[in-house]
Image: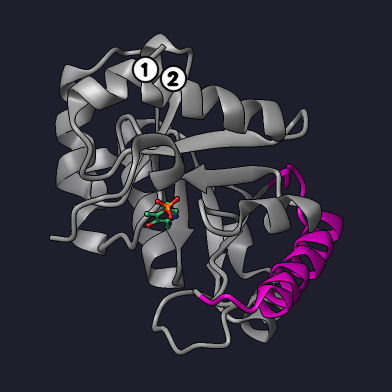
Amino acid sequence: MSDIARQLKAIREELPQGVVLVAVSKTKSEAAIMEAYGAGQRVFGENKVQELVAKHETLPGDIEWHMIGHLQRNKVKYLIGFVSLIHGVDSLRLLQEIDKRARGAGRVVDCLLQVHIAEEETKFGFDAPELLAHLEEGTFDAFKNVRIRGLMGMATFTDDTERVRREFRSLKTLYDRLQETWPGVDILSMGMSGDYPIAVEEGSTMVRIGSSIFGARNQA
Ligand SMILES: *Cc1c(COP(=O)(O)O)cnc(C)c1O
């Protein structure tokens, strides 16, 4: 068995039933992806549109491609025809563009709203009060060609596991609120190689794992 197949198997065995594993294949070769595919993996995540499109075009058609990175509005059109789930919807303007392009493509596209949970500064993601206000005001009712399936978040990159746990817990609380108010919410995307065991303990239903499957990435 290859390293990739072995690592994939070990992680799958560790994950509780019902937690979906997204194999994050960014920067990895098609050969590496095909090793994971050969071991039964069908859900892959990429964070760059160009790379996602190129891999979609050459790799098997039954792969579900997830866009996990920051998505620029002017690039939505390139992935709208085939993407299975967009994890990083971090603004209303992006949601609007996805809705418009999805309508043009005759699709209803599954999306996760990205929430800013890390204590460290980042420009991406809704914050919790903002999201609750949008729900209250029915802002999302307007989008008929997107299906909001849940939330995605990234914890602070730190050894302080209590802090990571606190951040995941805050996202889970918000997810529970969303589930009460919005129909069809069933995905909480949290957890990466370094923190997925904590994320799963805190209620994650989808983990995005790259380096623990494929090995470390070379820095660009
Ligand atoms: C790269 C990436 C991952 C996977 O990271 P690993 O630490 O390699 O598991 C997960 N989520 C997002 C949004 C990423 O960009």
In this rendering, position of residue 61 left or right of residue 23: left
In this rendering, position of residue 176 left or right of residue 197: right
- Seen from the viewer's position, the closer of residues 117 and 53 is 117
Give me the C-alpha separation between circle 2 and circle 1.
5 Å
Considering only vertical position in the picture, is 121 above or below 57? below
Q: Residues within 10 Å of mark 1 (few under 14, many from 20)?
A: few
Principal secondary structure, stretch drawn in magenta: helix
Considering only vertical position in the picture, is 41 above or below 109? above
Element class at badge 1: loop
- Asked if one can make out residue 179 in the rendered structure from this viewpoint, the answer is yes
Q: Identify the amino acid type marked 1.
A: Ser
Give the residue number, with chain letter if any, for mark 2: 5
- Seen from the viewer's position, the closer of residues 110 and 137 is 110
In this rendering, position of residue 173 left or right of residue 213: right
Give the residue number, with chain letter if any, for mark 1: 2
Residue 182 position within the rendered picture, expressed as x and y whole percent measured from the top left:
76, 55
Q: Which residues are magenta?
A: 158-187
63 inside magenta stretch: no
Considering only vertical position in the picture, is 100 above or below 45? below
Residue drawn at (59%, 33%), measured in percent from left and top? 11
Question: As drawn, which residue projects farthest toward the right?
Answer: 180
Pick the quarter of the image with the N terminus. top left
Residue drawn at (69%, 80%), measured in percent from left and top? 163
Pick the quarter of the image with the C terminus. bottom left
Residue drawn at (69%, 56%), measured in percent from left and top? 199
Residue 45 position within the rendered picture, expressed as x and y whole percent measured from the top left:
39, 40
